[in-house]
C-alpha cells in the first residue's frame, strides 16, 4: 500500500524522521512547506521502486540554513495518493 506515515518524533529539536511506502514504481515528491505554503526543503523528487523508505529532516532548508522554530508541513505525492503531515520544529 502506498502511504505516508506519521512523522516521529511529533516535535523535534534535532531531526524528524519521515517514512513512506510505495506499492508500485512511480514518481514521488516529498517536500517540506512553511505555514505560507512556500517550499523550504525537497526531500525526495524522482521515480522510486516499490518498498519502504525513511528520510530525516534536520530542520534546514534546501540551502542548508536552519529554519525557525514552528509548524511546517510535509506534503507527499505518489501514484494514486497525496498526503500531508504536520511537523513541529522546536530547538
Image: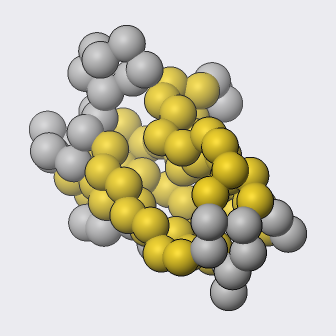
Residue 32 visible in the current orientation: no
- Image height check: is 1 above or below 32? below
The structure residue drawn at horizontal position 48% and vertical position 75%, both measured from the top left corner, is 52
Q: Is residue 22 above or below residue 76?
A: below
In the rendered view, would you say 50 is above or below 71?
below
Looking at the rendering, in which quadrant would you find the N terminus? bottom right
Please tell me in which quadrant of the rendered image residue 55 appears: bottom left
The quarter holding residue 80 reads bottom right
Q: Residue at x 50, y 56 (%)?
A: 86
Where, by quadrant of the figure, is residue 78 drawn? Answer: bottom right
Q: Provide residue 41's location: percent of width, then percent of height.
A: 48, 30
Residue 85 place in picture, x, y as percent: 55, 60
Residue farthest bottom in this picture: 1
Residue pictured at 62% horizontal, 57% vertical:
48
As drawn, is 18 to the left or to the right of 14? Answer: right
Let me know if residue 30 appears in the view. Answer: yes
| Foreground residue among 58 and 12 | 58
Q: Position of residue 23 (x, y in %)?
A: 69, 80
Give the residue displayed 53% in from the left and 76% down from the top: 51
Q: Quadrant of the C terminus?
A: top left
Measured from the top left, where is residue 21 in percent x and y? Answer: 56, 75
> How many numbered marks are there?
0
Q: Viewer-proximal residue, 69 or 42?
A: 42
Amino acid at each position: 500500500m502506498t502511504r505516508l506515515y506519521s512523522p516521529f518524533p511529533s516535535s523535534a529539536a534535532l531531526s524528524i524522521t519521515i517514512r513512506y511506502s510505495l506499492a508500485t514504481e512511480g514518481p514521488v515528491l516529498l517536500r517540506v512547506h512553511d505555514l505560507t505554503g512556500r517550499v523550504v526543503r525537497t526531500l525526495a523528487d524522482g521515480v522510486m521502486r516499490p518498498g519502504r523508505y525513511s528520510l530525516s529532516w534536520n530542520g534546514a532548508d534546501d540551502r542548508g540554513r536552519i529554519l525557525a522554530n514552528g509548524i511546517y508541513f510535509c506534503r507527499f505525492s505518489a501514484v494514486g495518493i497525496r498526503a500531508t503531515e504536520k511537523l513541529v520544529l522546536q530547538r
